[in-house]
Image (cartoon, rainbow, N blue to C red):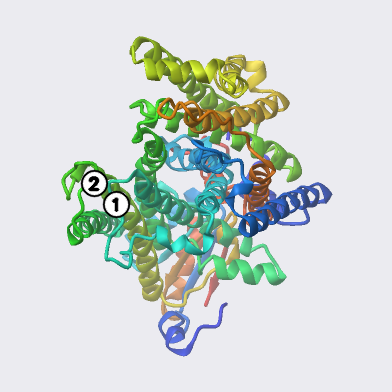
Amino acid sequence: MAEPTPRVTYDFVTRTIARTLGNPGRGYFLLLGAAVALLAIGIITLLFLLRYGLGLAGYSHPVYWAVFITCFVFWVGIAHSGTLISAILFLFRSGWRTAVYRTAEAMTVFAVMTAGLFPLIHIGRQWYFYWLVPYPNERGLWPNFKSPLIWDEFAIGTYFTVSTVFLIMGLIPDIAAVRDLATGWRKKLYTLCSVGWRGTNEEWRHYTRGYLYLAALATPLVLSVHSVVSWDFAMAIVPGWHATIFAPYFVAGAIYSGCAMVITLLVPIRKLFHLEELISVHHFENLSKLCLLTGSIVGYAYVCEYFVAWYGGNPVERAAFWYRAFGPYWWATWTMIICNGFLPHLLWVKTIRTNLTALFVISIFVNIGMWFERYVIIVVSLAGEPYTPWVSAVYNPTWADWGIMAGSFGWFFMWFLLFVKNFPAVSISEVKEVLPPPRRAHAGSRAHA
Amino acid sequence: MIPLPKPLHDIFRPPPTAGVLGVFTHLDATLEAIGKLRAAGHTDFTVYSPIPRHEIEDALGQAVSPVRMFTLIGGIAGCAVGAWLTLWMSYDWPLVVGGKPIGAIPPYVVIMFEMTVLFGALSTILGIVFNAAFAARRLGTIQWDPRFTNDKFGVFVPAEPAKAAAAEALLKGSGAEEVRRG
């Protein structure tokens, strides 16, 4: 909390957050309806893909990794800021994370759930999904552990599991708090979900230690996951992919897009659920500073890529980057450069950082830019690859690509909206932790630690 | 209360422990009560709080939670599983890929790392659940108040009815706003 007012007491925090579980009004249901409608579009498109095959998507040689893989990397990227805010900022003891981390963490879990769908859609024959599991085929051949795609499977699987248990762990004391205010079927649900939490000193002793270790494990994990995703590309020899800069470049981009998505989600949620006193402009300002930092790293990575393509003297690489900027996909490249290279620098201005409307608009453009970054890296690098110069087909996404992508947004927002309505969207116990504790002697003194 | 099957009920819901429960509004009053109880030789009392506070931990003088051993052992086991998985599977059907050794360590480090984190995190959860469940079992069925998850602190002192009056006086004297026997 920035400057807790005397009104913000423990009881106020519990009741304000418990109120988000009540009737959220028409705006919420309109948003939920829109999300479900988008998901329906995705499901119908998927049925068409199942019936008529992946040919409905715009694949054309040599572009066989296209919008589905772009969306996969996009959603994995979105997932990153959640663990950054909940684990890394926890280890750094930054108090401001308490008001926003639950939303970010839920976003992480649902974004990984969304990302996980894309490899399945991309394989075309979803009923063979178990081929991804490491077990020997009928000739006793095991999967190739030297392939980055297998690393990716382990990284994403671990990330999904760990971020889910981290979210659930954080939720337990808060569900117990809302359990003790709830009535009816909610009381039963929260009693079950709070696994008998009472807040004894023994429970807190093991819980706080365990939480610390989970954060310590999640911190290197979050950095590893997008590095491994980047190696899906960097391990290949396609010009534009084969670069050692990829791991830090992808991780910075992931956190950049993730923080932007947190802003995109928090602005309407704060308004819908009247959380103005708990989530203040100060929190948005800090989020936008994170955006500024990571956006600058991304901008620097763009400059590096182009500089090395020119200075490295490799004609193949130079041609690939020329194709990116001035070839048939120039519009995608320049969208990415403007949204990620220039737009974040607006955040140097404090009046923009503290203007929620401006932040909301910028965050949406950041996400558009980051989607195009992956599109440029994946599709444009493949389309412009110089090893098969006799192939001149230009790839364009079709309605099937856009339908699946719309479905993924519906799927993500549906889960997210259901979550914020049914579980505490702001951490109750951690927001209380940064408040001054009630004391007899000098009430209102600053919090310890 | 969730109904539990008979054997679980006997383990986790023993008959109520006799004792005194004090409800506190202020953190410093709670700390004072903890100090006085320890000075009076009580060791088996329970403190409830809506949030974890270092002051309470320090006043209780608790040992560091054994959860850390679960994390360490889980992490080491995960790393070993990652190494075994990749190396054994590679040598079980040796196939040269990309001119690299059959058992190439650098790419396998990625799998070993991910498995370290996965097993470490899951065993940390197990550690929390086991330790908290054993603590709940040791404490037995003790008095509790739903306000403890909101804004009140609580201290429960197990005491025979004959000795309850002394504990009651001690809690009141420290500033408990409400004291009840159970």
Viewer-proximal residue among A45 and B49: A45
Report the front residue among B77 and B61: B77
Q: Is residue A271 left or right of residue A94?
A: right
Residue, x 70% and y 23% (percent of image)?
A358
Looking at the rendered structure, whether the residues under marks 2 and 1 are on a common chain is answered as no
Q: Quadrant of the N terminus of chain B?
A: bottom right
Residue A449 quadrant: top left
**Is B5 drawn above or below residue A421 in the view shown?**
below
Nearer-the-camera pick, A127 or A64? A64
Percent across and percent down for residue A64 are: 50, 41
- Mark 2 is on which residue type? Val
Question: Is residue A401 shown left or right of residue A198?
Answer: right
- Please give the residue where the numbered disc 1 appears in the rendered image: A144
Residue found at x 51% / y 68%: A195
Residue B97 got which mark? 2
Give residue A346's position: percent from left, percent from top: 61, 16
Q: CA distance from mark 2 to mark 1?
A: 8 Å
Residue B119 horizontal side relative to residue A251, left or right: left
**Residue found at the far bottom of this picture:** B6
Q: Which secondary structure lies at badge 2?
A: loop
- Label 2 lies in what chain? B
Secondary structure under tag 1 reads: loop
Q: Chain of mark 1?
A: A
Whether residues under marks 2 and 1 lie with C-beta atoms below 8 angstroms apart, the answer is yes
Q: Position of residue A416 (x, y in %)?
A: 64, 50
Residue A216 seen in this snapshot = yes
- In the image, which is nearer the foreground, mark 2 or mark 1? 2
